[in-house]
Image (cartoon, grey):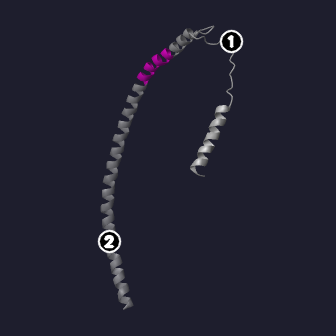
Amino acid sequence: MNLKELQAMIKEELDAYMSEEEVDVDVDMDAGDIDADGDESGDDSEDMLMQIYNMLKDKFEGEDDAEEVEDEEAEEEDAELAEEETVEEAKDEDLEEGKKEDEEDMKEEVSTEVTHLQERFKKLANIIK
């Protein structure tokens, strides 16, 4: 497709689009529709807004009390966490001390086992010769 063919195709589509008839939309205004000045028949928007305001006011005033309770609960949880941390630190210290003692005992046991194994290998080596 070359440029002339493309331009011809675009022109045909534009002509077809422009020649289409516009569809008129028929709108009926009922008694409950909004007028041009924004008034609506049976308008109770102020009442509705007041209800929404009161609901939100109650919700947010209730949250202040809930926040105080949440603050107290958070403080209690912090205290519990601090206690748990001190207990865990004490356990870690005990474990470290126990590991050091166990390592010292293991070194003594390992050194005796190593000497026995070395003697055994020496005997085995002499037998093979």
Task: Tell me the amino acid under the disc marked 2.
Answer: Thr
Q: Nearer the viewer, residue 70 or 35?
A: 35
Left or right: residue 70 versus residue 112 is: right
Badge 1 marks a residue whose secondary structure is loop
Q: Contact, CB < 8 Å: mark 2 with mark 1?
A: no
The span picked out in magenta is 56-69
**As drawn, 58 above or below 118:** above
Q: Residue at image x 68%, y 31%?
A: 20
Q: Nearer the viewer, residue 52 or 42?
A: 42
Q: Quadrant of residue 80?
A: top left
Q: Nearer the viewer, residue 25 or 114?
A: 25
Residue receiving disc 2 = 112
Determine crowd level at label 1: few under 14, some 14-19, many 20+ residues with C-alpha closer than 10 A: few
Quarter of the figure with the C terminus: bottom left
Q: Quadrant of residue 126?
A: bottom left
Viewer-side label of 2, 1:
1
- Is residue 62 inside the magenta stretch? yes
Sequence-earlier tag: 2 or 1: 1
> Picture coordinates of residue 81 (x, y %)?
38, 37
Q: Residue at image x 30%, y 57%?
A: 100
Determine crowd level at label 2: few under 14, some 14-19, many 20+ residues with C-alpha closer than 10 A: few
Residue 30 badge = 1
- Is residue 67 inside the magenta stretch? yes
Residue 15 badge = none
For marks 2 and 1, give the CA distance: 105 Å
Prevalent SS, magenta region: helix
